[in-house]
Amino acid sequence: MSKIEMSKKDGKRSDKAQQVVEGFTGKLNRQAVLSFGTCVHCGLCADSCHYYLATGDPKMTPAYKADQVRHLYKKHVDWMGRVAPGWVGGSDLQTDEDLDKMKDVVFGSCTMCRRCTVNCPFGVDKALMMRFMRGHLTRAGVAPQGVLDVNKDQWEIGNQMGVSQEDYLETLEWLQDELRAEVEDDTAEIPIDKEGANIVFVVNPREIKYAPLSLLAAAKIFYVAGENWTMPSVGWDNTNFGLFSGLDDLGGHMGKLAFDQAEKLGVQKMVISECGHGFRSTKWESPNWAKMDLEFPIESFLETMVDYVNTGRISLDPSLNPDPVTYHDPCNLSRSSGMTEEPRFLLKRSCMDFREMYPNRADSFCCSGGGGAMSMSEYAPRRLEVAKVKADQIKETGAKAVATACHNCVDGLADLIKHYKINIPVKNVCEFVADAIVMPAVEKPVEVPAVEVFAEKTVLVVDDEPDVVTFLTTFLQDQGFKTLSARDGDEGMQLAKEHRPDLITLDVTMPGKSGISVYNDLRKDPELDHIPVFIITGVVEFRQLMYHRNMEAPEGYMEKPINNDVLLMQIRRILGAEVKVAS
Ligand code: SF4
Ligand code: SF4
């Protein structure tokens, strides 16, 4: 009988702790043993971690955090530790409280950015150790609720935001209308399941659900380049929570969904939209997790765009992006995938004033939203505190916009920019490229003014901030809407009952009745449950809505500050309005 079984029999270890310890003492690969077994506590990695730099807390140094996991290895795996655990610093997990403390370390105190790894003379990979422990905790159900929810959606629905296939296809159809308006060509397409296409393009579900501008930008770039491309109807999510939650089987499941569809369509290559962990997991990890020998290459959309510029398939005019722009290197692209020059190539040709932030490339600091942190709302205050390191870097550049090549980083940066009041936009590289693209000359179609499109539609704006109400009502009236406004939830409900608007925009945090309770009341009322609701809210609540599944999804979400273009696009989608009609 092993020591683990004996401890169980003695009743010292909780059932969950037993499960974690049993899993932990299973098969370890060479990389893991090297990292678990090697650390001379020289402290050289301390200054590499944004958690330590921002807090000065010794418990936030990479070596200390790694030791919390390493102690278990020392006790149960290291041969000396099995004989004399105290001698080598071995310790155990016994109670559910021990598991919660471990959860706080591996999920809440490390974004698995690997900056400490490249700053360790032995290359000790703390992120690998964290992922290893995350996997065993997740299997025991000891993980942030957002991670568990996203895992479930990837297993059951095939994408991390629980988007149904119907909604996905409808969104692509709507985006195709937007593309046609953008390029002023009624034949422009977002093809779906086109067999024999050169490229199958897989995206981050954030692009489908909340941030369509990057997908629209990509579609525009494919259109101008004359690419033979397609979106897949299934297996379209390039993200993979198997990487963050430590579940190789989930990683394989997500990889297989995408790879099977690409093979079925017979495409020449798979292109990953700008997503750091999506690229790393799909290109480098998923073929192994899925045990598949792929017949096609995988590349980042950054590489595709560089090729289009180099071969003259697209031309860029940097004067179309005159403001200073800096670039944030996503950890999974720069440090873990070596992709540092492609975004710079593109930004230098798309923007008049490109400015580096320092340190950069493989030495870049994490945006603080890596490792799945954006889905872990319980750690948001700590995430924002340690984001100060990145906020200071951005401020020093004096840039008026931040570019990055990762949707997760866009969210992480947007949150810190708001928190530290930097007040500049964050966009993916492809959006800067699309804005700089020189369009081929076409005959201009006639546009139907927006005011005609939305005439007779009424929007009720419910928000306690007078500035937001003024902004939204003015903007919506400019688009042709009639508007009503309410400053709290009770007034909002009353106006909804009296006027039955075509759409309600709803803040979440308001004095008195909260937006969530208004939303629930609307959904329960048979007279009002058909009215689409667009939630416009602050950062933390928004992340909870994105990643937690404890309520039916509203028709639209947006975080403040409000992006007019996205708001209008989403309203057109919700109301099924034609954007512009060419005659
Ligand atoms: S730099 Fe490497 S050896 Fe030194 S404390 Fe950090 S992990 Fe340990
Ligand atoms: S991987 Fe990144 S967040 Fe984690 S300990 Fe190392 S430097 Fe800190």
Image: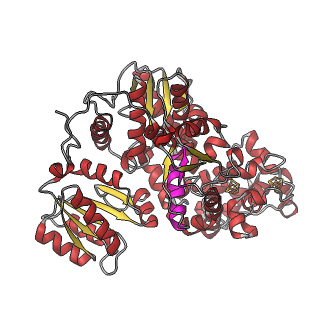
x 42%, y 59%: residue: 548
Query: Can residue 446 be found in the magenta stretch?
Result: no
Give the quarter of the image for residue 515: bottom left
* Badge count: 0
Which of the image's four quarters has the C terminus?
Answer: top left
> How is the rendered protein coloured?
secondary structure
- What percent of the width, then of the height, locates residue 335? 68, 43
Question: Which residue ends up furthest to the bottom in the rendered image?
Answer: 512
Secondary structure mainly formed by the magenta segment: helix
Ligand 2 occupies quarter: bottom right
Query: Can residue 403 be found in the magenta stretch?
Result: yes
Give the quarter of the image for residue 83: bottom right
For the record, the magenta segment spans 400-419
Q: Is residue 526 above or below residue 574?
A: below
Q: Is residue 170 above or below residue 439?
A: below
- What percent of the width, then of the height, locates residue 544? 43, 62
x 22%, y 55%: residue: 479
Q: Is residue 91 above or below residue 231?
A: below
Q: Looking at this view, is 393 or 464 the one in front?
A: 393
x 47%, y 50%: residue: 151
In this orientation, does residue 25 appear?
Answer: no
In screen coordinates, is 90 left or right of 346?
right
Give the quarter of the image for residue 16: bottom right
- What percent of the width, then of the height, locates residue 395? 61, 61
Q: Is residue 506 above or below residue 175?
A: below
- What percent of the width, then of the height, locates residue 462? 27, 70
Q: Looking at this view, is 518 or 480 the one in front?
A: 480
Q: Looking at this view, is 37 or 429 the one in front?
A: 429
In screen coordinates, is 33 left or right of 561?
right
In this orientation, does residue 266 appear?
Answer: yes
Q: Looking at this view, is 486 or 145 the one in front?
A: 486
